Image (tube, rainbow, N blue to C red):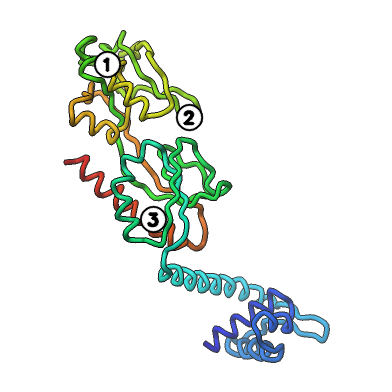
Amino acid sequence: MDRLGGLTAFVRTADLGSFVAAGRVLGLSASAVGKAVTNLEKDVGVRLFQRSTRSLRLTEEGRLFHERCRRVLDELNDAEASLASAIAVPRGKLRVSVPIVTYHLLLPVLPEFVERYPEIELDLDFNDRVVDLIDEEVDVAIRSGNLPDSRLMSRTLRPFQMLLCAAPSYLERHGTPECPRELDGHLAIRFRYPNSRKIQDLPITLPPEGAEPHLHTALTCNNMEALRSTVIAGLGIGCMPDFLARAPVADGRLRTILDEHLNAPGQFHLLWPSSRHLSPKVRVLVDFLSEKLFTETCEKLSS
């Protein structure tokens, strides 16, 4: 502890330029700080400061030592803060931004989280807009696709697959395509990305000589729930994630088509602002969703 006290006194003196200023910060007298630095110099066998009646300057060896000591103290402070965070009770409001479609994944697992952490108040924003977590003070977000923002930390959640679906009534009227070229002339329900306003591509793999099929767009929307409802109503063929299609496929309201020609894997990610210390409420949500939305849902997909 004497060595640590000497390191702290040395770093504060080098930062502030005097024993008096360092003493004010450390709650010690200037003489006590000076003595701690002198003892440190004796321990390391090197003069760290050039002293005069008017100035206090680091020696060349002192400058090198200061850089290393500064990193050591920062790491120690970081470790103490992380430990305090780990044992703190997670509490307070937790703002979470999630795509609308992910409520199918979130709602079944959230009761367990609320029961486990009763002092956390969840504030869920179901919105397909890509929010700026830092500017809009959002604690955690779920996103798919590319992650260009280097200010954010991330953790991978579950993978998903895009499927082509149609209602049995539609397929009875228009026929069931057996290969991509048989999509020609079919009616399509297309999804428009809310931010870029681009139309989603069909998730099909074409043979080298194959031409892009020509579907007639019957309806375009920027909400996957609306797209699914429209496809269930029999208006056309639509593309949606597997977890959104699972229930209506299971009960017969939808059928998947061209499964062997699909190649559109996707991935969800948890994002939160980068910082030296992860708050307890963010940490427990990240760990909880990483467990529930990766292992459990992936097991369901493979079963």
Q: Label 3 crowding class (10 Å Cα cut-off): few <14, some 14-19, many 20+? A: many
Q: Amino acid at mark 3?
A: Leu
Q: Which residue is nearer to you in this view: 95 or 295?
A: 95
Give the Cα separation between the discs numbered 2 and 1: 27 Å
Q: Which residue is nearer to you in this view: 275 or 92?
A: 92
Q: Secondary structure at mark 3?
A: helix
Q: Amino acid at mark 1?
A: Pro
Residue 285 — which label?
A: 3
Q: Label 2 crowding class (10 Å Cα cut-off): few <14, some 14-19, many 20+? A: some
Give the Cα separation between the discs numbered 3 and 1: 42 Å
Instruction: Kindly identify which residue carries mark 1.
Output: 180
Q: Is residue 213 above or below residue 89?
A: above
Q: Quadrant of residue 221?
A: top left
Q: Quadrant of residue 280?
A: bottom left
x 18%, y 26%: residue: 252
Q: How many marks?
A: 3
The percent position of residue 48, horizontal first and vertical second, equals 67, 81
Which tag, 3 or 1, sits closer to the chain's start?
Answer: 1
Image position of 136 (left or right of 124): right
Nearer the viewer's eye, disc 3 or disc 1? 3
Q: Amino acid at mark 2?
A: Pro
Which tag, 2 or 1, sits closer to the chain's start?
Answer: 1
Q: Secondary structure at mark 1?
A: helix
Q: Secondary structure at mark 2?
A: loop
Q: Which residue is nearer to you in this view: 132 or 184?
A: 132
The quarter of the image holding the C terminus is: top left
Nearer the viewer's eye, disc 2 or disc 1? 2
Tell me if label 3 and label 1 are in contact, CB under 8 Å: no
Residue 194 — which label?
A: 2
Q: Is residue 254 above or below residue 110?
A: above
